[in-house]
Each structure stands twice: as C-alpha cells, then as structure tokens.
Amino acid sequence: MMIKVVRGNPTPEELAAALAVVRARAAAASATPSGASGPRDSWSDPARIAAHRLPQPGPATWTRTYWPG
C-alpha cells in the first residue's frame, strides 16, 4: 500500500494516524464477503417513513409538518 502526501506537511504522528485509519477500513472491507451488504442504515429505510400516518389534506395542512411525531 502506498500513500502519497500531495499537499501540506504532516507530522509523523499525523501520517501514522491516517495510515491506521486506512488500514482498519481496508481490513474491515476485506473481512466482509463480497456479495453481502453491510448493515442497513435506518435513515435510508423506507419503512421508517411509511410506519407513520402522514397528515391528511385539509384547510390547515400547511401548518402540520411532513414528518409526524
């Protein structure tokens, strides 16, 4: 693995920290099977929105928020 600094003048400690993060991410990526997806993020889950009733149309609809709760 080769890392090239293209801008700035990092200290040896900063380089070591950056390399540790890159190695940890690479190890985590190689440990996950290629066909398997990672854990689903709750923000991207469409069931989160559909689980609640949305406000019904009416004269005061503009005063209600789109996100119930």
Image: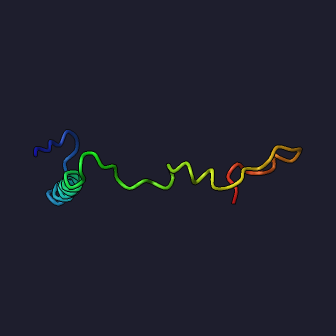
Residue at the image point whose x is 22% and y is 40% from the top: 7
Measuring from the top left, give residue 36's x and y in whole percent: 30, 49
Measuring from the top left, give residue 1's x and y in whole percent: 10, 46
User: In the depicted view, which residue is nearer to us: 36 or 56?
Assistant: 36
Whether residue 47 appears in this view of the structure is yes
User: In the depicted view, which residue is nearer to us: 34 or 9?
Assistant: 34
Left or right? Give the position of 44 relative to 21.
right
Left or right? Give the position of 47 relative to 60.
left
Whether residue 14 appears in this view of the structure is no
Residue at the image point whose x is 21% and y is 57% from the top: 24
The answer to which image quadrant residue 5 occupies is: top left
Outermost residue on the left side: it is 1
Colour option used: rainbow
Outermost residue on the right side: it is 59
Left or right? Give the position of 42 relative to 65.
left
User: In the depicted view, which residue is nearer to us: 28 or 13?
Assistant: 28
Outermost residue on the top side: it is 6
Which quadrant holds the C terminus? Answer: bottom right
Measuring from the top left, give residue 33's x and y in whole percent: 23, 51
Residue at the image point whose x is 23% and y is 56% from the top: 28
Measuring from the top left, give residue 59's x and y in whole percent: 89, 44
Q: Say how many tags the image has.
A: 0
Residue at the image point whose x is 34% and y is 53% from the top: 38
